[in-house]
Image: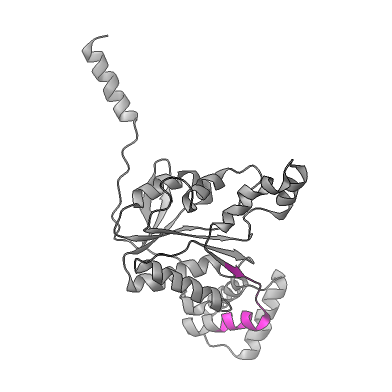
Amino acid sequence: MTKKVLKRIAEALERLAPAPLEAPDFGASAFVWHTEPDRLVPVQKVSRVDVSLLVGVDRSRDTLLANTQQFARGMPANNALLWGARGMGKSSLVKAIHGKVSADYPLLKIVEIQREDLESIGRCLNLLRGRPERFVLFCDDLSFSHDDAHYKSLKAVLDGGIEGRPDNVVLYATSNRRHLMPRDMIENERSSAINPAEAVEEKVSLSDRFGLWLGFHPCDQDQYLEMIRGYCREYGIEIDEQTLWAEAIEWQATRGSRSGRVAWQYFTDLAGRRGVSLG
C-alpha cells in the first residue's frame, strides 16, 4: 500500500473521529448536558420562580439554601435528594435556590443532566473537574426500573470509584420515590432472591449516598390558596377573596388533587383571562 493511499486513509479516519470535547464559555449561569456529541449547552433564560413564592416547603427551603450557600463559598456540602409528592415544587426549589445564591456568588452554575444520560456522567464531570466555578449538577425526576443499570454510573460518582465526585460539583436530584425504585420491584427482588437483603441493597443504598433527604408532602387547602395569593401579588392581579376561593377550589376538584403545580395551573388560567403576561 502506497504512502499516498495510507495518507488518504488517515485523513478519512481523522474526519470520522469525534472532535475533542472543549470547555464552553462559562459566562452563562445554567447549562444542559447533551451527548452524541458530548457538549454543555448554555441556557440563556432559566425557567424558574422566585424562592419566596414557594409555599409550604420552609424546612426544605432553608436546609437546601444553607447547603448551597455553603457550597458556593467553597466549603464542603452534601448531595441532596428531594423526594415526595408530585407537583410540590421539588425541581422549582432547586432552580429557585440556585437563582438566589448565584446572585451573590456568580461562579455558582447549574448543569442539568437527563436521567437517560447518566451513563455519560463521568465524562461530564471530567469537563467540570478543576474549574474555578462551582457546579450544581441537577437531575430531575430520577428513578430506576427493574432492569435499569444507569444507577451504577451514578453510584460511582456519589462516593464510589477512584476519582469520585470533584470538589467543585454537588449533585441535586428530585424523585417521587424515596428509594429511587418502585416498592413492588423492591418486594419482587426480595421474594425471588437467594439472599433477599443483598438483592435490593445495591439499588436501595443509592439513596443513602445523598447526604440530605428532603421530603415533600401534599399541601393542605390553606397552603394551596396561599400559593395562588402569592402569585397574584407577584404579578399584580387583583381578585376578591370569595371569587378566588370559589374558582381555585373548583379547579382543584376538577384535577382531583392539590399541589403547587395545580395552583400554578389555575393561576396561569386566571392570568390569561385577565390579559396578564407571565413572560
Residue 226 on image: x %, y %: 59, 83
User: Is 218 contained in the magenta span?
Assistant: yes
Residue 205 on image: x %, y %: 60, 53
Left or right position of 13 against 140: left
Asked whether residue 117 appears in the rendered view, the answer is: no
In the displayed structure, 199 sits above or below 60; it is: above
The residue shown at (53%, 47%) is: 116
The residue shown at (70%, 49%) is: 197
- Residue found at the very far right of the displayed protein: 191
Q: Magenta stretch?
A: 214-229
In the displayed structure, 238 sits above or below 276; it is: below
Q: Nearer the viewer, residue 65 or 251?
A: 65
Q: Nearer the viewer, residue 129 or 45?
A: 129
Which quarter of the image is occupied by the C terminus? bottom left
Residue 129 on image: x %, y %: 34, 52
Q: Which image quarter: residue 209?
A: bottom right
Residue 216 on image: x %, y %: 61, 70
The residue shown at (57%, 78%) is: 270
